[in-house]
């Protein structure tokens, strides 16, 4: 009999009290983006620090130029983990769409046998961060100690761009550096299937403006003779994909790796179809590289996307103008080892090669970050995967995400740590929207999941 | 000795008085687009009717739902011609850029030996329409009659879209129908070279909107899987020209004729270079079909132009959005016998063939009119060309225009008449702009030119 079983029993026994504790935290209106709630943000940080102290953590509220951080440490043997979550929440408007007060949490049965916790932050991210706190509490109650050395970082600006995070990590790198990070801000594949996110795509943003004549021209007078920047821009963009959906920029696929076949098989086993994935937004045909599933396309393949285009007369009616310029916003989602700087340079060369000699092009950079790709066979992830699989009806899946979670890159960059991204949100949690909720099963089995993960890591 | 010589002498003798008469007309603030000048428009019409009566025309001011028309008739032998001009003018703002009051005309010497008449409407079109009135006056003074039957139509809404013109032509077709029309609202090739315009390009305007997902998508979540309407639209537009600059829409060139080689040679002789033509707007390389001069490209070749494009996020900064829709305004300049309806249908087929099955496209029509192409060897034009060549230092050139002059199509459609387009404006006349002027040589030799044309037509 391991040390784990009594901890899981304790979590079961503690459930009602743990709900009460979450409700206390949910009642604090810690909306980070609205200065009116500055004091509430600090109150949430203080509440968390006090709660962590009550478990035996050395916890403190640390000032930043914005909202404070909560940092806590607890000694232990074995590996050192840093758990990350954020206590700030999104604004609640439009308030009239909420079925009950967003800051008066409640437990509701939404269908027979399915209870949910309602309220702003119940899923994103207060409910999720408390999972880990409750797991630690039960460990302490049962064993008087934690199974390993644990540090905790709770941020209060995640919903408002995390302006203080990087400086804080840099300034406190020695204190915060652990063997690996745990981030609980993601979701499950479905209600039965837990998920670990091992890939996050990177991003390169570019804005290009094609300049032709030095003024807008009349298309009667100059049409057929003068360069048309919309035509040039369309050609540049159209040239960027071939007929199979591949990006044609030379060197674009340098650093892109094929996803291991057993991973592809595990994704296939999820049963996601093109029709399901695209059907919710009214589409049905994948637009990316042919022969790859929508999951592979969005999780493990790079893209070139056109996010905006503008030129000439775009108002009502018609104007027979040949514009002086036209512009587009272009972004690239990167995977694996693609290098943002090289992608940007290759893109610019590609564009320049297509600009007529009497025209010009101007580039503006809009950010760039590499992809994050954890090793599918890292022992740390394998252990966590098994722990999750032990808790839930179906085995955990290792998936990737099409977007980015900046904290993961920051942990890598500033603290040299890899992250375990495991969370228990569901797609219908309505995070950032009215009537946010968190399934009681996520809250309960999520606590048990973190207890299992902590236990597994120490073996 | 013909009847012409004493008429030309009379015009020379009348010059000072004709300038005074033009000044009277220029002082009337007949701005058609601004309701504040409604009474001034009527005043200009009345002034013209009175002046024409004084020469012996049966002239009247005819009400329309907008500004009135002036219609005048004078009997005569031989062919029946209808002369068209417009007495309304453009607004004058920004007033502070005028060197003198736009409605206080003056005669100024702008360089040694070069005098100009200044004032709003001096060139467009009061100065030009008075040329013909003065030619008629001199004929009457010398011979007591006109060399042929003459009708005159002066419009007061040309600068505000001519809303009343078509209904008026339809309602008065029997009265206004002549053997051919004469329109004096165009320019010379240069100060020494008069021009007759024999081709005006037609126009088909289309607006297309490509619809993809039923909402804007996050490019992290859906990029690589969901159709991007900007990509689809770019491909459609890029496909519309081949590498030689030809339009690729099937059937697009049906009805396009090659310009006679002697006409091309006469255009070559004008000495216009790509660098000259495009240099004034900061360009140098013709963008149309390769192997054709800028004059042929803009006067005698059809085009597909993109006049506007819009989709996704176009504000400051960046948004990783995949738009739900993207749209473009596309226009075609038509020549010769290209059929607007067939071009529109072929374009729509071309677009539809490039829309993925799970996306859709919407079309909006923005007008369509065929090209006007007069025969280069029409006896009427040949005579007029000779008459002009007799008056000016260099022979008249038959050219075309890239834009359209709706009245010419209306005369063809409603009255079954072809038009002679001859005018004496110069490119530096600043029509529609502050400090509009008309060269005294245009005003003097223009009168003589119309006298010569009238004389030539009767032979």
Image (cartoon, coloured by chain):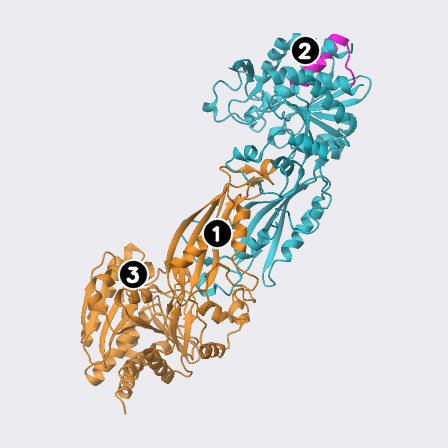
Chain colours: A cyan, B orange
Drawn side of residue A213 relative to residue B131, left or right: right
Q: Which mark is residue B157?
A: 3
Given contact means CB atoms under 8 Å apart, are the residues at marks 1 and 2 in contact? no
Along the line of sight, the residue nearer the viewer: B410 or B76: B410
Q: Name the residue beneath numbered marker 2.
A: A11
Question: Can residue B87 be seen from the camera position used here?
Answer: no
Tell me which label, 3 or 1, sits earlier in the chain. Answer: 3
For label 1, the SS is: helix
Residue at left 78%, top 27%? A177
Magenta highlight range:
A130-148
Q: Is label 1 or label 2 in front?
A: 1
Secondary structure, magenta segment, majority class? helix
Q: Name the residue beneath numbered marker 1.
A: B351
Drawn side of residue B298 relative to residue B105, left or right: right
Q: Residues within 10 Å of mark 1 (few under 14, many from 20)?
A: many
Along the line of sight, the residue nearer the viewer: A235 or A260: A260
Which quarter of the figure has residue B11?
bottom left
Q: Do labels 3 and 1 share a chain?
A: yes
Q: Is label 3 or label 1 in front?
A: 1
Question: Can residue B393 be seen from the camera position used here?
Answer: yes
Placement of the C terminus of chain B among the 4 image quadrants: bottom left
Placement of the N terminus of chain B among the 4 image quadrants: bottom left
Q: Is label 2 or label 3 in front?
A: 2
Q: Which chain carries label 3?
A: B
In the rendering, at what x and y percent does residue B65 appear?
23, 56
Which quarter of the figure has residue A266?
top right
Q: Which mark is residue A78?
A: none
Along the line of sight, the residue nearer the viewer: B206 or B246: B246
Q: Which chain carries label 1?
A: B
Q: What is the total number of numbered labels drawn onto the structure image?
A: 3
């Amino acid at each position: 009999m391991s040390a784990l079983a009594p901890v899981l029993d304790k979590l079961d026994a503690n459930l009602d009290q743990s709900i009460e504790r979450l409700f206390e935290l949910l009642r604090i209106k810690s909306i980070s983006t609205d200065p009116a709630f500055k004091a509430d943000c600090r109150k949430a940080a203080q509440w968390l620090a006090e709660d962590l102290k009550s478990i035996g953590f050395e916890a403190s509220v640390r000032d930043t130029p914005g909202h404070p951080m909560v940092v806590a440490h607890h000694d232990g043997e074995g590996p050192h983990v840093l758990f990350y979550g954020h206590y700030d929440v999104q604004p609640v408007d439009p308030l009239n769409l909420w079925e009950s007060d967003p800051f008066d949490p409640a437990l509701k049965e939404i269908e027979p046998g399915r209870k949910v916790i309602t309220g702003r932050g119940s899923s994103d991210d207060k409910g999720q961060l408390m999972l880990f706190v409750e797991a630690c509490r039960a460990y302490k109650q049962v064993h008087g100690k934690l199974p390993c050395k644990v540090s905790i970082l709770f941020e209060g600006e995640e919903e408002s761009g995390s302006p203080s995070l990087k400086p804080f990590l840099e300034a406190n790198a020695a204190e915060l550096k652990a063997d690996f990070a745990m981030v609980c801000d993601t979701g499950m594949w479905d209600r039965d299937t837990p998920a670990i996110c091992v890939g996050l795509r990177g991003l390169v943003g570019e804005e290009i403006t094609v300049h032709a004549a030095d003024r807008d021209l009349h298309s009667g007078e100059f049409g057929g003779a003068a360069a048309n920047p919309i035509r040039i821009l369309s050609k540049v963009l159209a040239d960027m994909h071939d007929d199979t959906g591949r990006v044609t920029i030379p060197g674009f696929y340098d650093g892109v790796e094929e996803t291991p076949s057993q991973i592809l098989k595990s994704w296939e086993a999820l049963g996601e179809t093109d029709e399901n994935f695209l059907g919710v937004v009214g589409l049905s045909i994948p637009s990316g590289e042919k022969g790859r599933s929508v999951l592979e396309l969005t999780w493990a393949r790079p893209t070139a996307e056109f996010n905006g285009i503008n030129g000439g007369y775009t108002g009502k009616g018609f104007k027979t103008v040949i514009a002086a310029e036209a512009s587009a916003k272009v972004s690239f989602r990167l995977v694996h080892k693609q290098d943002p700087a090289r992608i940007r340079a290759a893109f610019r060369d590609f564009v320049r090669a297509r600009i007529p000699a009497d025209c010009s092009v101007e580039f503006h950079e809009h950010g760039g970050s590499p992809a994050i790709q954890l090793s599918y066979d890292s022992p740390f992830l394998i252990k966590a995967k098994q722990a999750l699989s032990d808790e839930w009806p179906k085995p955990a899946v290792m998936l990737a995400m099409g977007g980015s979670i900046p904290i993961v890159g920051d942990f890598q960059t500033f603290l040299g740590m890899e992250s375990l991204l495991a969370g228990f949100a569901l797609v219908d949690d309505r995070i950032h929207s009215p009537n946010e909720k968190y399934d009681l099963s996520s809250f309960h089995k999520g606590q048990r999941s973190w207890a299992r993960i902590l236990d597994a890591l120490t073996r």
